[in-house]
Amino acid sequence: MEATVNGRCASLDAADPHTNALDWLRSQGLTGAKEGCAEGECGACSVLVAKPDSTGEGTTWVAVNSCLISALSLEGQEVVTSEGLGSADDLHPVQQEMASRGGSQCGYCTPGFICSMASEFYRDSRQACEHADAEHGPNGFDLHSLSGNLCRCTGYRPIRDAAYALGFPESGDALAARRTQPAPQAAPTRVSAAGATFVRPRDLDEALSLLAESPQAQLVAGATDWGVGVNLLRSRAETVIAIDRLPQLRELTETDEAVEIGAALTLSEIENRLDGSIPLLAKLFPQFASRLIRNGATLGGNIGTGSPIGDSPPVLLALEAEVILTSTSGDRSVPLADYFTGYRQTVRAPGEIIRALRLPKPLARLTDFHKIAKRRFDDISSVAIAYAVDVSDGIVTRAAIGLGGVAATPIRARATEAALLGQPWSAETVSAAAEAMSTEGTPMSDHRASDRYRRAVLGTSLPKFFESTMESVR
């Protein structure tokens, strides 16, 4: 068992199912990547992994948190660390700009910044733009690509300056040329060590058979939640089944009736493929954790954890999504509003896998997503509210509102929806519905917010949404 790291073969034989990629890379002497938080918030562990592009025929260099993913998931894959980008005698363009513009002081976080920056440097769709904004440079560099990297001493201005000074890959750049060829296929893997077994099945049928045999097995896609448990809570599953590269879970199809999104597509892949065609999802993506997390996290995983504060459930509830569950007995569809049954509990039966999320058409015309958190980006929400409303001739004909952070599960704001349906879309209607909104759920007080604050947010969110729709409904 081996992976290709910086162009050389590296043995995975010493790794067990709970060895993360960061620890394995450092055991290979590649100590550029560091552990800063062990939960995917600081980006000091960022490395590049070669993954299929949107066509499936080329490669894209994706930055990931190596502290979260299993080392065994890299069997047969290609990885580039900061050491593989350049050397002291031959700096990579990203390294050169960081050095010349003072982008590093202590250097602890620098290798992670460099790998995240290199991923954006090699993004195919990056183009020079005449009208840069606060989050995009004149070279098309998207600062969101660095939203998962934290710096403790340098300050972000010189890092931003380095990013905005980058040109484009020159001819002869090996990593740029690599993009034109297919990415490595997922290698079927089975390893038993340290009392646990890691399996990457060949296909969905094998995954379902394994799950039928071991219903308590841990299903892993991006590992952005599971990896935290392994690192900080010492979680140890007896059987780990990697489903992130199963083709049947990575499809995105659109018909006149619905959009179906594979449960194992990463949020970054979904964002790129939809390209803004579902506006409510487009508003969610930039506020969901960080680019590093979105490069691994999946909708299936975010739903599967059953967390009441996941960012995608309120949005998917407003979109009236259905969860497609599959097992050896076939598929079944469950409305997302009926999927959650209690705190981190769902209707998913032992032996079932979330195959896809189905979003029925037509989509609502008026949508928005309000996320209240202590930081604008890369933070867990205190309250999350998603709206999907239709207004015809001044009357509300459709209202679906998803809430997160105000109950033991994500919920629909049923009382508020009822107060809106069939009523004029007016300040008077909204004021009355806002009172109903403030009573939704069962908010609690914790370190993120008090119950009173959460109720106050619920009461003020709907009028804010109403004001934002004025131009659209005139």
Image (spheres, rainbow, N blue to C red):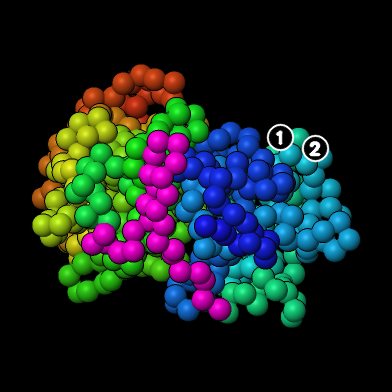
Q: Is disc 1 surrounded by few (<14), some (14 to 19) or many (20+) residues within 10 Å?
A: few
Is 336 left or right of 304, judged from the image as shown?
A: left
**x, y percentage for residue 237?**
36, 36
Residue occupying image coordinates x 25% and y 39%: 216
- Residue 152: mark in rendering: 1
- The quarter of the picture where the C terminus appears is bottom left
Residue 200 in magenta stretch: yes
Q: Which residue is mark 2?
A: 106
Is 438 left or right of 293, judged from the image as shown?
A: left
Q: Is residue 324 above or below residue 41?
A: below
Residue occupying image coordinates x 42% and y 49%: 191
Is 11 left or right of 165, judged from the image as shown?
A: left
Is 159 left or right of 264, judged from the image as shown?
A: right
| Front disc: 1 or 2 | 2
Q: Amino acid at mark 2?
A: Cys
Mark 2 secondary-structure assignment: loop
Mark 1 or 2, nearer chain start:
2
Q: Amino acid at mark 1?
A: Arg
- Residues drawn in magenta: 181-206
- Residue 338: mark in rendering: none
Instruction: Let me know if residue 98 appears in the view.
Output: yes
Alpha carbon distance from label 1 to label 2: 9 Å
The one nearer the camera, 21 or 313, is 21
Residue occupying image coordinates x 20% and y 39%: 346
The one nearer the camera, 210 or 429, is 210
Residue 342 in magenta stretch: no
**x, y percentage for residue 230?**
45, 34
**x, y percentage for residue 18?**
47, 40
Q: Is disc 2 surrounded by few (<14), some (14 to 19) or many (20+) residues within 10 Å?
A: few
Instruction: Let me know if residue 413 appears in the view.
Output: no
